[in-house]
Image (spheres, rainbow, N blue to C red):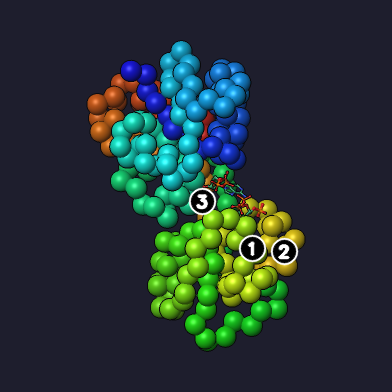
Amino acid sequence: MKPTIALTKGRLEKQFIAFLESIDFDVEPLVNKGRKLRVETDTLQFIFAKGPDVTTYVEHGIADLGIVGGDILAEFQPDVYNLFPLPFGHCRMAVATEQGQVWSNQKKKIASKYTGITKEFFKDKGESVDIIKLEGSVELAPILGLADAIVDIVETGTTLKENGLVIKEEFFSFSARCIANRSSLKIKRAELTPIIDIFQKQGGNL
Ligand SMILES: Nc1ncnc2c1ncn2[C@@H]1O[C@H](COP(=O)(O)OP(=O)(O)OP(=O)(O)O)[C@@H](O)[C@H]1O
Ligand SMILES: O=P(O)(O)OC[C@H]1O[C@H](OP(=O)(O)OP(=O)(O)O)[C@H](O)[C@@H]1O
């Protein structure tokens, strides 16, 4: 059985393929996969899934390695080896509010896709908040009065800016990371070590 790598679809998939290309890996089967969710090359099998599901496939040993955002690891805390950062997917997690919002002492409503991270953040501050779970377009929540603030990913800051929001506090910087199934690292050490080494070494050079 070829080693299996689970890739996060979307942004990270594109950036990971560019990374593979930069280390002279033949990415043609990945680039031309169409709607296929499983692609085999001569040496590897790739599967494509949403970030939280990448961690599930790796945790269950269906995938040996995974490429996933640090945000997903912080939110879901899967039981996997969190091996090393990759040189793409750099973002920050931030609390943001409407420009000019007065931050009173009253209990706040915080909207986020990341309820676990939000809960931990305010718990560490000793502040009790009501958390409202959203699935995306989180920046809408303060504008429309659903929440006082959001906790969300910021990369360039464009989405915040174009929606009249400002960062109140940044608290977590992260990038994409390479994760591994705990047993695979022992059982398939011989096959996985060269892959891990090249990702880690080349990642450091970019
Ligand atoms: N604006 C961003 N810039 C860079 N990386 C990002 C950004 N937003 C998210 N990411 C990273 O990419 C990963 C995948 O995000 P992406 O937006 O592609 O998928 P998603 O969160 O499942 O959203 P969607 O449901 O729109 O596909 C995130 O877990 C995070 O690590
Ligand atoms: O700082 P920026 O460069 O503007 O990037 C940040 C935006 O990117 C992500 O949203 P995404 O595009 O994944 O859409 P979503 O709101 O549906 O999650 C994130 O949730 C922010 O909204």
Residue at the disc numbered 1: 139
Label 1, label 3: how many angstroms apart (C-alpha)?
20 Å
State the quadrant of the C terminus: top right
Mark 2 element type: loop
Residue 86 locus on image (x, y percent):
50, 39
Upstream in sequence: badge 2 or badge 1: 1
Q: Residue furthest right?
A: 162
Instruction: Give the amino acid at mark 3.
Output: Phe
Instruction: Give the amino acid at mark 1.
Output: Glu
Q: Are marks 2 and 1 in contact (CB under 8 Å)?
A: yes
> Within the image, what quadrant is residue 191 found in?
top left
State the quadrant of the N terminus: top left
Residue 109 locus on image (x, y percent):
53, 75
Mark 3 close to ligand 1, CB under 8 Å: yes
What number is the disc on residue 163? 2
What number is the disc on residue 98? none
Label 3, label 2: how many angstroms apart (C-alpha)?
23 Å
- Left or right placement of residue 139 versus residue 115 in this view: right
Front of the two marks 1 and 3: 1
Give above or below for 97 relative to 93: below
Mark 3 element type: strand
- The reply to whether residue 140 is visible in this rendering is yes
Mark 1 close to ligand 2, CB under 8 Å: yes
Instruction: Give the amino acid at mark 2.
Output: Asn
Mark 1 element type: loop
Residue at the disc numbered 3: 174
